[in-house]
Structure formats: C-alpha cells, structure tokens
Image (cartoon, grey):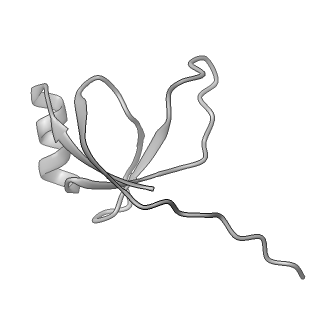
Amino acid sequence: MRIKLEGITQKGKNRVKEHGQWWGMLDWFHPTDSIAFAIESVMTGDRRWITNDFKIIEKVGVECSKTINQ
C-alpha cells in the first residue's frame, strides 16, 4: 500500500521535502511497539519508522508480496 504523508512538525516537514510525499509500507515489525510500521520513500528509497511527525492524508492500493518458487 502507498500512503501520502504531510509533515506536522518541522522534522516531518523536512522529511517530506527531502524524500517526497509518497511512501510505501514495509513488512517490518517494530521490536517494542506492536502498532508501529515502517515506510519507504518512493522517490529516494529512504526507510524509517512512521512517527507522530507525520499525518497520513491519503492511502492508495494494496500491494501483495509474491513468493517465487525456485
């Protein structure tokens, strides 16, 4: 799934300016926070945990992971 972010704090606004508004959700599990999720910038490939520095303003699509049999 892709999400469009808006920065709330100055830190969040800087991240959106540097890495773009569109991010993809990753299948990473946070070691201490079960509801936290990781995101990856579509524009730069930067990866980070989503924090309260951002607000999700749009969600688009659902991506399925593929298993390749070898």
- Residue at x-position 77% and y-position 70%: 67
- Residue at x-position 43% and y-position 46%: 39
Q: What residue occupies the far top of the structure in this picture?
A: 32
Q: Is residue 69 left or right of residue 64?
A: right
Relative height, residue 59 to residue 28 (above, below): below
- Return the x and y of residue 34 as percentages of the image width and height: 60, 22
- Residue at x-position 23% and y-position 33%: 55
Q: Quadrant of residue 22?
A: bottom left
Relative height, residue 52 to residue 24 (above, below): above
Q: What residue occupies the far right of the structure in this picture?
A: 70
Relative height, residue 9 to residue 68 (above, below): above
Foreground: 50 or 61? Answer: 61
Number of labels in the image equals 0
The image quadrant where one finds the C terminus is: bottom right
- Residue at x-position 53% and y-position 50%: 26
Q: Quadrant of residue 51?
A: top left
Q: Is residue 8 left or right of residue 22?
A: left
- Return the x and y of residue 7 as percentages of the image width and height: 15, 36
Q: Is residue 25 left or right of residue 51?
A: right
Relative height, residue 41 to residue 43 (above, below): above
The image quadrant where one finds the N terminus is: bottom left
- Return the x and y of residue 14 as percentages of the image width and height: 13, 40
- Return the x and y of residue 19 as percentages of the image width and height: 23, 54
Q: What residue occupies the far bottom of the structure in this picture?
A: 70
